[in-house]
Image: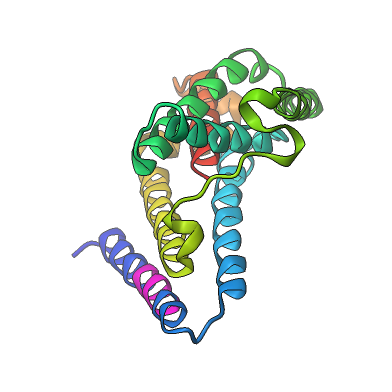
Amino acid sequence: MTKNFRNTIILFAVGILATALPAALIAAGAIDAYTAQIFSLAGINAIMALSVNIICGITGQLSLGQAGFMAIGGYSTILLCTNAHIPLPLAVVLAAAITAFFGFLIGFPTLRLEGDYLAIVTLAFGEIIRVFLVNLKQWTGGPNGIQFNTIMVFNPAVAFGVVTGILVILIALIQNFIRSSYGRAILAVREDEIAANSSGIGVFRYKMIGFVLASFVAGIG
């Protein structure tokens, strides 16, 4: 058994324990619904933190627009479920893919910028998305948002289990991605773009991969 495989098994075991034990306590009533909701929101924000870590920590690009991508993913999920009557799990995946597409559209011109310029452009993107969603009241409900009732709203144990399970799976997938050839190339670009380019690594290409991946994860959150 290789070290990487063993670490993955340990991560999954810890993740299953961290998901199953609190979910069982919530279902048994040992943890009240309000506290369970806080745990679920913490898990959602942890998924968002993974997205920020991918673009800022792993890729090394200062992006301030991840909240905008998260909003696109959230509203896309709701609209796909309510208007297209798509099951929630499939809607989440499709919404993440839609968000990744927006990430590609934004990343293609902006990733040619660096430092403060990239941060300013992505911050502006996030603000544009916010204003757009607030004013598109027919589809988004305006400042009050959309009421979206699923079993996750009425069953705190299910909500916590689903959110934490997705978080654990994403952590494991990202860890394996970092160890892959794509992940190592992204890390090389982060450390030294000139050296990476001299080694035949397409700097812009791998920046785009990191940016789109971060957008995808934000869309799930």
Eyeballing the image, is 194 above or below 161? above
Can residue 188 be seen here? no
Nearest to the observer: residue 147 or residue 132: 147
Q: In the orientation shown, which residue stands out farthest toward the top?
A: 109
Can residue 83 be seen here? yes
- Residue occupying image coordinates x 55% and y 40%: 218
Nearest to the observer: residue 201 or residue 168: 168
In the rendered structure, does residue 150 fall within the stretch colored magenta? no
In the rendered structure, does residue 21 fall within the stretch colored magenta? yes
Q: In the orientation shown, which residue stands out farthest toward the bottom?
A: 30
- Residue occupying image coordinates x 77% and y 30%: 123
Q: Quadrant of residue 42?
A: bottom right
Nearest to the observer: residue 44 or residue 66: 44
Q: In this rendering, would 55 be left or right of 91?
A: right
Q: How many marks?
A: 0
Measured from the top left, where is residue 46 in percent x and y? Answer: 57, 56
Measured from the top left, where is residue 92 in percent x and y? Answer: 42, 39
Query: Magenta span covers which residues?
Result: 15-22
Tell me the colour scheme of the image.
rainbow
Q: Quadrant of residue 23?
A: bottom left
Q: In this rendering, would 128 be left or right of 32?
A: right
- Residue occupying image coordinates x 40% and y 30%: 94
Q: Could you tell me what secondary structure mostly forms the magenta stretch?
A: helix
Measured from the top left, where is residue 152 in percent x and y? Answer: 46, 57
Nearest to the observer: residue 69 or residue 214: 69
Measured from the top left, where is residue 205 in percent x and y? Answer: 49, 20
- Residue occupying image coordinates x 81% and y 28%: 116
Quarter of the figure with the N terminus: bottom left
Q: Quadrant of residue 57?
A: top right
